[in-house]
Image: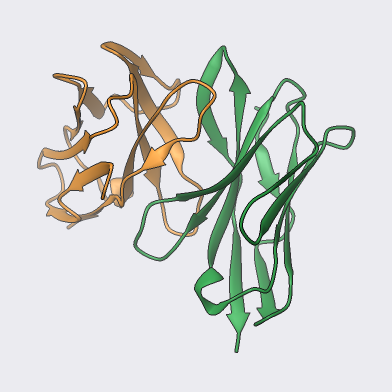
């Protein structure tokens, strides 16, 4: 079935650099997307979300970009810190008639000191 | 303050011995979800409740059952755990068009 997936399973980044985590989705009906961060031994933690009527949304040190033309979603983390080391999942919610979340495979981000 | 609380954090059960995992939420959301997450994989939805309406995913084994006695609590019952059921079980709650809030999970070991 249709699902959300990530391009790379792992990402190693130098502390202080910017990180970009990518995600591709295949369901054109999806209208709500969320990025989660999951640290070892914990549940997924909400980072930022975006609806399909937007192409960019910013939070504190994070930016989510949505390109509906190519069905691509990305998460940018500015000035990556050691505490950003975690697994990052993108997830899609197909909108008002489907409030279930479908998760992509995840990207493990490792921050090098 | 934790909004979704799962107990216990770690659970060990024997092969075939029934086990119950519990979840409570303080957000008063209509919807509660149970996800299964195996090592290095994405969470996989098992089922969800919209109020008292139970919704099973098509590929969720019959071995997994759930109860929701009230808005705040939801239980996952595994009737006859197999070795393949060892995983992290995540409970979540949320509303339509809003992000889910997850608990920290229960890690189930089957011996």
Residue B65, position in %: x, y?
23, 25
Left or right? Give the position of A49 relative to B36.
right
Q: Colour of chain A?
A: green
**Taking the image as drawn, is residue A85 in sight?**
no
Residue drawn 49% across the image and 59% down it: B40
Direction bottom: furthest residue:
A113
**Taking the image as drawn, is residue B63 in sight?**
yes
Residue drawn 70% across the image and 67% down it: A78
Report how many numbered discs are placed on residues in the image.
Answer: 0
Q: Is the C terminus of chain B in the top left, top right, bottom left or bottom right quadrant?
A: bottom left
Residue B54, position in %: x, y?
31, 14
Residue drawn 81% across the image and 36% down it: A71
Q: Colour of chain B?
A: orange
Left or right? Give the position of A87 relative to A10.
left
Residue A60, position in %: x, y?
61, 57
Residue drawn 19% across the image and 21% down it: B68
Q: How is the image coloured?
A: by chain
In this rendering, the answer to whether B100 lies above or below B47 is: below
Residue A8, position in %: x, y?
71, 60
In this rendering, the answer to whether B5 lies above or below A26 is: below
Left or right? Give the position of B24 relative to B29.
left
In this rendering, the answer to whether B32 lies above or below B7 is: above
């Amino acid at each position: 079935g249709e699902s959300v997936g990530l391009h790379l399973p792992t990402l190693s980044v130098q502390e202080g650099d910017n990180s970009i985590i990518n995600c591709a989705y295949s369901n054109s009906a999806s209208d709500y997307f969320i990025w989660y961060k999951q640290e070892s031994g914990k549940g997924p933690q909400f980072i930022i979300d975006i609806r399909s009527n937007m192409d960019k949304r910013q939070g504190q040190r994070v930016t989510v970009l949505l390109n509906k033309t190519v069905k691509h979603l990305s998460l940018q983390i500015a000035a990556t810190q050691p505490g950003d080391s975690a697994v990052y999942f993108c997830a899609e919610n197909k909108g008002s008639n489907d409030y279930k979340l479908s998760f992509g495979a995840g990207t493990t981000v490792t921050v090098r000191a | 303050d934790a909004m979704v609380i799962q107990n216990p954090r770690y659970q060990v059960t024997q092969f075939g011995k029934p086990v119950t995992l519990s979840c409570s939420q303080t957000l008063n959301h209509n919807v509660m979800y149970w996800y299964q997450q195996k090592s290095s994989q994405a969470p996989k939805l098992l089922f969800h409740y919209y109020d008292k309406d139970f919704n099973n995913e098509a590929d969720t084994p019959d071995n997994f059952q759930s109860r929701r006695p009230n808005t705040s609590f939801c239980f996952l019952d595994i009737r006859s755990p197999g070795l393949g059921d060892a995983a992290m079980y995540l409970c979540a709650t949320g509303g339509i068009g809003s992000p889910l809030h997850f608990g920290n999970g229960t890690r189930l070991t089957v011996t």
